[in-house]
Amino acid sequence: MDWFENWFDSPFYKILYNNRDDREAQKFTDQLICYLTPPAGSSMLDIACGEGRFSLQLAEKGYDVTGIDISANSIEHAKTHETNHLHFYVQDMRFPFYINYFDFAFNFFTSFGYFKYDRDHRMAARSFAGALKKGGILVIDYFNYKNVLKSMVNAADVEREEITFHITKKFERKHIIKDIKFTDQQNIARHFTESVATFSLEDFVEMFSAAGLTLIETFGDYQLAPYHPEDTPRMIMIFKKH
């Protein structure tokens, strides 16, 4: 299994990241929809949706939303929120899903760059593009690795629910690799890894241009401030299908 299949389906993933800011996520969604102005009833795909927090926010705005994720456990949780206009499926982002179907597709919170080989990222880019109608919009929210590397803490302990997660980070083979070690509640030693590619804006443009998408705008944070290659924390990229 790939690292993300092991880690994202683990109950400890949710414990470690239980402090994520839902209010910030809601404000970001509001800003994004204000910028994009999707017509009422637009069809939307949330790629790598996790347990569906962004999907829920989009559906609450009246859109027809489908969320996909490789984690069966996350999708099982997300399905408890399904409605006539909100659906979830277990799906690997590298493979085609509902061809030429969606008006908008979203890939939030650095949910790309997980693969060891670039061919897999290119497969995913083609899959993202294939899901969109002609003229459809893709939004990718990715970390700005140059900014991350400047402030990266190489080692830290994080306390969550009486578990101490020992976390180390390194930059290796064009990936930021995070090792996560801890002893669980049953006194069993655990070890998980995260590995995310350090793609630049130019890398994304090249990869997604080859898939038939054109970059039309880039923002640098969740308030949609201008992007700067050295200083802004995010690369929020807006692509349009030819």
Image (cartoon, rainbow, N blue to C red):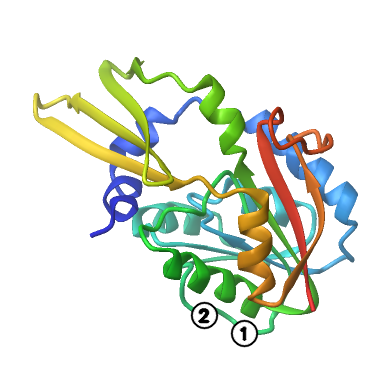
Counting the numbered discs, the total is 2
Q: Quadrant of residue 67?
A: bottom right
Helix, strand or loop at disc 2?
loop
Q: Is residue 193 visible?
A: yes
Q: Position of residue 43 (x, y in %)?
A: 74, 71
- Direction from residue 149 to residue 22 in the image, left or right: right
Residue located at (79% from left, 48% from top): 218
Residue 91 in view, yes or no: no
Tell me the crowding category of disc 1: few under 14, some 14 to 19, or many 20 or more residues within 10 angstroms, Cα based: few
Question: Considering only vertical position in the picture, is 143 above or below 101?
Answer: above
Quickly name the residue at label 1: 99
Measured Cα–Cα span from mark 2 to mark 1? 7 Å
Element class at badge 1: loop
Q: Are marks 2 and 1 in contact (CB under 8 Å)?
A: yes
> Which percent across, then down, holds residue 4?
34, 51
Q: Which residue is mark 2?
A: 96
